[in-house]
């Protein structure tokens, strides 16, 4: 595996000079977050991003994310033009040396929490999904909650221009069920995967987070049966998964090491997000340190599965807690994610030498 760290560009409070000092680091996972979803990413901006990262001694091999426009998820007539733009972006990224593009296919909302700074007993704080709070929350109230807690930093997947039209967006999904979403994902993949095959990019679909429907919106990237079906939509090695342990792991029925073995042995995992969560019986969960004993997931078993299938692709720690007084983008501080990397390095070295 190669170790990467998500970085939000020049607006990120964490400088690349600090990222460079994390042991074993190879590169950063970045994006052009200010380009409106649906537009082709300008070539000069991509190259500028790459040069800045390389000047810091790091690689730009993974993009997270090139977001998919809602009209593509909805199957609206305008999707064809938007998909053409997506293909242009993919070609330009390949020219800049990018190998993997992470994306998701979640309607309206991206990842989803009810509290971005939930206090933990050790004095740190973490992202929290409280099932009882969710039961009473409207979509608009949720958006306000996230905005209020994001410390003025744009949260990935919560682009203001998209969420400004929340009511009409929710309306437009009336009648779009899981089957329609599968069909619209197939249409998208059939268009972009041939380009990926041509230019050498691997598409890595991120699971829905959390992996169940919300506010009546369908979510399909949720569990093994659906993942099997999704990978069969287009049978190409360029079409694979970002296997996110924390997202899929929010549902106790998802056996993460088994999923890693299943898809890793078929060469269909292109990017690994490895983190831990602590689940509660009512469906609530909060994020924890990466350490197995702090959460519900066994990180040793997860990494052992990656090791056993011969995984050699990119890995990144995922959301961390806020510790040691750090402030910044919730889930994306430096300290706890760097600790996560140190732990992943240790597990991996033991597996390699064992
Ligand atoms: Mn993830």
Image: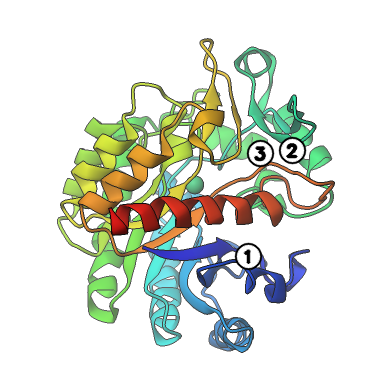
- Does 186 appear above or below 80? above
Closer mark to the observer between disc 2 and disc 1: 1
Q: How many marks?
A: 3
| Side of 5 where 201 appears, left or right | left
Q: Earlier in the sequence, mark 2 or mark 1?
A: 1
Q: Is residue 236 above or below residue 55?
A: above
Q: Give the residue displayed 33% in from the left and 38% down from the top.
A: 301
Quarter location, residue 81 = bottom left
Task: Compare marks 1 and 3 and give the one earlier in the sequence.
Answer: 1
Say what secondary structure mark 2 lies in.
helix
Position of 140 with respect to 282 (left or right) is right
Q: Residue 146 shows which numbered tag?
A: 2
Q: Splitting the image into 4 quarters, where does residue 176 fall?
A: top left
Question: What is the secondary structure assignment of the residue under circle 3?
Answer: helix
Residue at left offset 50%, top offset 23%: 216
Viewer-nearest of discs 3 and 2 = 2
Q: Which mark is residue 166?
A: 3
Mark 3 neighbour class, 10 Å CA radius: few under 14, some 14 to 19, many 20 or more: some
């Amino acid at each position: 595996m190669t170790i990467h760290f998500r970085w939000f560009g020049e607006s990120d409070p964490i400088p690349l000079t600090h990222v460079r000092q994390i042991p074993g680091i190879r590169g950063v996972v970045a994006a052009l977050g200010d380009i409106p979803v649906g537009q082709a990413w300008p070539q000069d901006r991509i190259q500028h991003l790459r040069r800045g990262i390389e000047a810091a001694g790091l690689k730009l091999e993974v993009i997270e994310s090139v977001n998919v426009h809602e009209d593509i998820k909805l199957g609206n007539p305008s999707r064809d033009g938007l998909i053409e733009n997506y293909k242009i972006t993919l070609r330009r990224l390949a020219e800049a040396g990018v190998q993997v593009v992470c994306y998701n296919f979640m309607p309206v909302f991206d990842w989803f929490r009810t509290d971005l700074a939930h206090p933990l007993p050790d004095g740190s704080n973490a992202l929290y999904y409280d099932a009882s709070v969710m039961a009473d929350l409207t979509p608009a109230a949720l958006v306000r909650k996230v905005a209020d807690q994001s410390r003025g930093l744009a949260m990935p997947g919560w682009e203001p221009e998209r969420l400004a039209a929340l009511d009409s967006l929710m309306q437009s999904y009336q009648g779009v069920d899981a089957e329609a979403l599968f069909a619209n994902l197939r249409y998208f993949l059939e268009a972009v995967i041939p380009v990926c095959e041509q230019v050498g990019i691997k598409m890595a679909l991120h699971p829905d987070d959390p992996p169940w429907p919300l506010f009546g919106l369908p979510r399909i990237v949720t569990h093994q049966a659906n993942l099997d079906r999704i990978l069969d939509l287009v049978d190409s090695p360029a079409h694979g998964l970002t296997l996110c342990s924390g997202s899929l792991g929010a549902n106790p029925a998802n056996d993460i090491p088994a999923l890693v073995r299943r898809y890793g042995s078929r060469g269909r995992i292109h990017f690994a997000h490895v983190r831990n969560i602590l689940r509660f019986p009512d469906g609530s969960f909060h994020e924890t340190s990466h350490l197995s004993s702090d959460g519900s997931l066994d990180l040793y078993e997860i990494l052992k599965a990656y090791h056993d299938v011969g995984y050699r692709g990119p890995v990144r720690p995922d959301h961390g807690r806020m510790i040691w007084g750090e402030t910044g983008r919730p889930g994306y501080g430096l300290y706890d994610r760097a600790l996560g990397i140190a732990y992943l390095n240790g597990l991996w070295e033991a597996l390699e030498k064992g």
